[in-house]
């Protein structure tokens, strides 16, 4: 039997059959119908905001069946990425005297989201003294995990989550030392506090 890998499957939500009450039930049904083993075809994540689709641990034959299913758009193998830092203000062409930066009141009440190595919430850079209340449009959460609980978020660090189910699905025997949004490398803390 071929080894399974984790894939992100992009789906056309408009192709969802009316028999399903939600996209999540559609994805689960699709996976149940193609699974060639109880160890394969397991849903890892369902995506609804920026993209529509799901990630799942699939064998090559299961992936092929998914590619021929109703609503399939494309797929990408889930993989680890390297940490990369840029000089953000220069990269974005920001000027403190004119343009988008002063026009946006220097980012006041802007919600910034990052995918990185995590955060170290005790950093002085996350001090929320003088910060306005969390914008009412905020829909995120502060997820608890190893050495990280939701009380560590505040009016500046308004949310923190960790997404490692794909890594675990691809490496079931992996030991994750810090299974939370806590940063153990410093990169995520650096980039998120630089973005402030």
Image (tube, helix red, strand yellow):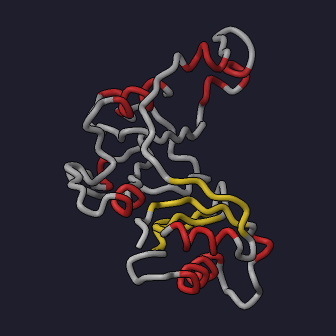
Left/right placement of residue 180 relative to residue 111 reads: left
Residue drawn at (52%, 16%) of the image: 87
Residue 117 in which image quadrant = top left
Q: Is residue 192 found left or right of 15 in the rendered image?
A: left
Q: Residue at x 57, y 40 (%)?
A: 111
Q: x, y percentage for residue 139?
A: 55, 57
Could you say which is closer to the camera, residue 158 or residue 40?
A: 40
> Residue at the location (48% across, 72% down)?
43
Q: Residue furthest right?
A: 14
> Residue 84 appears at what percent x and percent y?
46, 27
Q: How many marks?
A: 0
Across and down, in percent, residue 95 comes to 66, 11
Q: Nearer the viewer, residue 114 or 12?
A: 12
Relative to 74, is 173 on the left or the right?
left
| Residue nearer the viewer, 104 or 21 | 21
Res 98 seen here: yes
Looking at the image, residue 99 lies above or below residue 59: above
Q: Residue at x 60, y 13 (%)?
A: 90
């Amino acid at each position: 039997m071929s080894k399974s890998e984790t894939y992100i499957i992009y789906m056309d939500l408009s192709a969802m059959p009316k028999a399903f009450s939600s996209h999540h039930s559609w994805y689960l049904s699709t996976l149940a119908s193609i699974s060639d083993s109880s160890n394969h075809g397991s849903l890892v994540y369902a995506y609804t905001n920026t993209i529509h689709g799901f990630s799942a641990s699939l064998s090559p034959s299961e992936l092929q069946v998914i590619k021929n299913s109703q609503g399939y758009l494309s797929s990408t193998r889930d993989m680890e990425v390297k940490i990369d830092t840029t000089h953000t203000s220069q990269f974005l062409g920001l000027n403190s005297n004119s343009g988008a930066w002063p026009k946006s009141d220097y980012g006041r009440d802007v919600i910034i989201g990052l995918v990185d190595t995590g955060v170290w919430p005790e950093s002085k850079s996350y001090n929320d003294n003088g910060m306005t209340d969390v914008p009412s449009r905020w829909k995120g959460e502060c997820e608890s995990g190893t050495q990280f609980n939701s009380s560590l978020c505040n009016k500046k660090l308004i949310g923190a989550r960790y997404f490692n189910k794909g890594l675990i699905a691809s490496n079931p025997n992996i030991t994750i030392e810090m299974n939370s949004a806590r940063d153990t490398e410093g990169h995520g803390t650096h980039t998120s506090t630089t973005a402030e």
